[in-house]
Amino acid sequence: AGNGIMLAFSYLSGNVVVARSIDAGRTWSTSSPAALAGATIPERWYDADSQRFWLCGSLPSDGSSLWYSSDGITWTHISAESSIGSRASRIAASGDLLVVSAAPDTWGIWISTNLGATWTRTPALPQTGIAEPFLGRWNGAFRVAVGTTLYSSPDLSAWTSISAPAALQAFAT
């Protein structure tokens, strides 16, 4: 939740429905923003640095897509199809920095430092692995799980393999 705003997402008749609360969940209003019409959205992220809500998914006509909003009402669409391929599956954000994992045709971690205007694939990670790499940000570092291996990077220029928790090891086998 950001700026006291809480969001929840659902689908109704093939469209994304956004439920929004500005009073800690006591009351909710719903809308189906036109910018999200027909979207498939598997991933949501809140960036406290920029106070933006992020959605990562796809549109039938546009492939990989990202959307952001500071209020949960107005959404800005970013097409990523031409850069990262057909299926963006995970997102982490910090200010204008976006980190997206994509699969299956362009598996990898893609980085944008300018709100998605341009993208670069990080070469430092193994480019094979599970079809849906897990991506997140904890304690100031980005983390990526590839199979049973967990990688960490504070600045996205170099990745270090770290010991994966037992739960991840058990989940991946």
Image: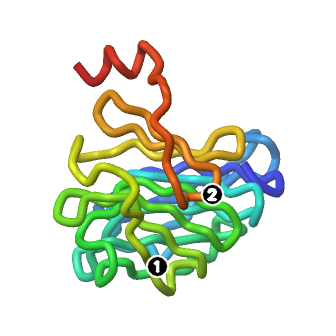
Question: Farthest left residue?
Answer: 105
Left or right, residue 33 beside residue 141:
left
Task: Report if residue 30 is visible in the image.
Answer: yes
- Residue corresponding to mark 1: 34
User: How many dots with numbers?
Assistant: 2
From the viewer's perspective, is residue 94 above or below residue 142?
below
Left or right, residue 59 beside residue 26:
left
Expressed as whole percent of the image width and height from the top left, the position of residue 49 reads 77, 60
From the viewer's perspective, is residue 81 above or below residue 153?
below
Specify the label residue 155 is tagged with. 2
Expressed as whole percent of the image width and height from the top left, the position of residue 123 reads 37, 62
**Secondary-structure class at tag 2:** loop
Query: Amino acid under label 1?
Result: Ala
Q: Quadrant of residue 120?
A: bottom left
Depth check: 18 or 92 in front? 92
Q: Quadrant of residue 13?
A: bottom left
> Which residue does the image show at 57% across and 53% down from the upper left?
45
Query: Amino acid under label 2?
Result: Asp
> Which residue does the image show at 25% across and 73% down from the upper left?
85
The quadrant of the rendering that contains the C terminus is top left
Left or right, residue 105 beside residue 11:
left
Specify the label residue 124 is tagged with. none
> Upstream in the sequence, badge 1 or badge 2?
1
From the viewer's perspective, is residue 167 above or below residue 160?
above
Q: How is the image coloured?
A: rainbow
